[in-house]
Amino acid sequence: YPLFQLGGPQLRIFRPNFFMLAVRPGVPQPEDTVQFRVSMEMTKVDIKNYLEKIYNVPVAAVRTRIQYGANNKRNHKNQRVKKPDYKVAYVQLGQGQTFQFPNLFPEKEQDAEARSFDDFKDKYMEREKQRQKGDPRRGGVPDWFGL
Amino acid sequence: MAAAVAMAALCRRFTAALRLSGARPGSTLAGLPGLRLNLFHKNLAKAEPLHQLKFLHTTLSRKGLEEFFDDPRNWGEKTVKSGDAWNIKQLRGKSSEDLHKLWYVLLKEKNMLLTLEQESKRQLKPMPSPERLEKVEKSMKNIDLVVKEREIALRLLQTGHEKPVPGEWRHDFLGRTYWYSYKEWPIPWYLNKKYKRRKFYYLPHVDRFIRLRLEKSLRIKARRQNLERTRQKVLERKFPHLAVKSQSQ
C-alpha cells in the first residue's frame, strides 16, 4: 500500500480481498455480540467499515484478539505441523439488534434411497455381530477355546 | 493498512441520484424519514421509503447478517447445486461497473461458504458441496486478472509505462539477478540504516557459485528435454498409427 504522510490522501481499497466468517461462540456471548474470524491484517475500524458498507449492518463496537495456532502436533516425518493463527473479532451490533447463531444442520427427512441404504447397513452389521458370537450349544464361548 | 473501504464510483452515483435532506445511504434509523438504499443486493437501486416505520418498534431486518448464511432451504442438505465458475472470456465482455458489483457478490458468497465450512468442522458434519469455494476463488482471481489487464492497457496509453511501480534489475549478494521495484520511504536512502546494510553487489569469490548454479540449471533443463524425447519415442513405438507425419520437403 502507498505510504501515508500527514496531509496525504486517505487510502481506499476498491476490491477488498479480506474474508470474514461468522463463527459460533465457544463461550456464551451477550445477545448483541457476534463473533467473527477475520483476516489478520484487518483493524477494528476496517471491520466496522466492512460490515457497515458491504453488509449494511450497524456496528456499535468492535474488539479484536489474535488467536495463536498451536505448533506442537507432529506429522509422520516427525516435523512440527502448525495450525494457522487467526484474528477473532467480537462485534456489538448497534440499534439494539440481537443475533443468535443459527443451526445450519437441522435434521431433514431422508429420501427413499438413503433410508434403504441405512436399512441395508443395519442388517449387515447385525449379520457380522451374529458371526462374531460363539456357538450357542457351547454357551457362547468363542471357537478359539477348546478342542 | 486500509483505514476505509470505499466503493467510490458506485456509492457516488447512487447517493447523488437519490440523496434527500438528512438521508444517508444505509442509514436505517427508524426515526428518520427518508430513503434507505440497499446497495449490495442483487436487484440494485431498490429504494424503500422508511417513514411508515416512524412509530413502530421493530428490529430492523437482519438481512445484513443473514447474508453470512445460505438460503435457509439449503440448511441440512447433503449437496447444493451451483453453476460453473466465471470464465476470463466471459468476464472480459463485462463493464468495469459490472465487474465491481460481481466482485462484492463473490466476496459475500465466499464469506458465506467459509462460515459454512467452519460450522461444519465444529459440528463434525460434512460440508455440503465444498467445490463452490474453489469456483468462487477461481472467479475472483479471473476478475482480478481482467481488471489488471485493463489497468495496464490504460496506463500504457496514458503514460507509456506497463508496471504501476518503477524498478530495475539488481544483483543480490549471492550473484542472482532479480527485478527490484522501488519502495516508498519517508527518508532518503543515505539515512536509511536497514537499506544501507543490504548489498546490491557481489564480491569476486561468488563467480564460481554463479557458474555452478548455471551448470545445475542447464543439467535440469537437459534432463527435462531428454525425458520429454524418450516419452515421445515410447508413445510412437506403442501407437505408430497416431504418430505425427513429418512434412517431407
Image (cartoon, coloured by chain):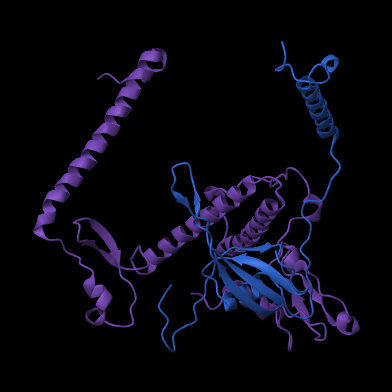
Chain colours: A blue, B purple
* Most distant residue in the right direction: B55
- Quarter of the image containing the C terminus of chain A? top right
Residue B154 versus residue B216: which sits nearer the camera? B216
Q: Residue furthest left?
A: B204
Quadrant containing the N terminus of chain A in the rendered view: bottom left
Residue positioned 82% across, 78% down in the render: B49
- Which residue is rendered at x = 38% and y = 67% of the image? B164
Give the camera-side residue of A136 and B139. A136
- A22 vs B172, left or right, is right
Q: Position of residue A77 (x, y in %)?
A: 44, 42
Does A119 sit left or right of B160 as displayed?
right
Residue appearing at x 39%, y 66% in the figure? B155
Q: Nearer the viewer, residue A1 or B208?
A: B208
Using the rendered view, name the quadrant where residue B11 is placed.
bottom right
Q: Where in the figure is residue B190, as x and y percent of width and height?
A: 22, 80
Left or right: where A43 falls relative to A96:
left
In which image quadrant can residue A128 be found? top right
Residue B245 visible to an observer of this rendering: no
Q: How many marks?
A: 0
When the figure is inspected, residue B45 is found, relative to residue A121, above or below; the finding is: below
Q: Is residue B87 above or below residue B180?
A: above
Residue A86 visible in rendering: yes
How far across and down, in percent of the image, does residue B176 sit? 22, 55
Residue sitting farthest toward the front = A146
Q: Is residue B19 above or below residue B223?
A: below
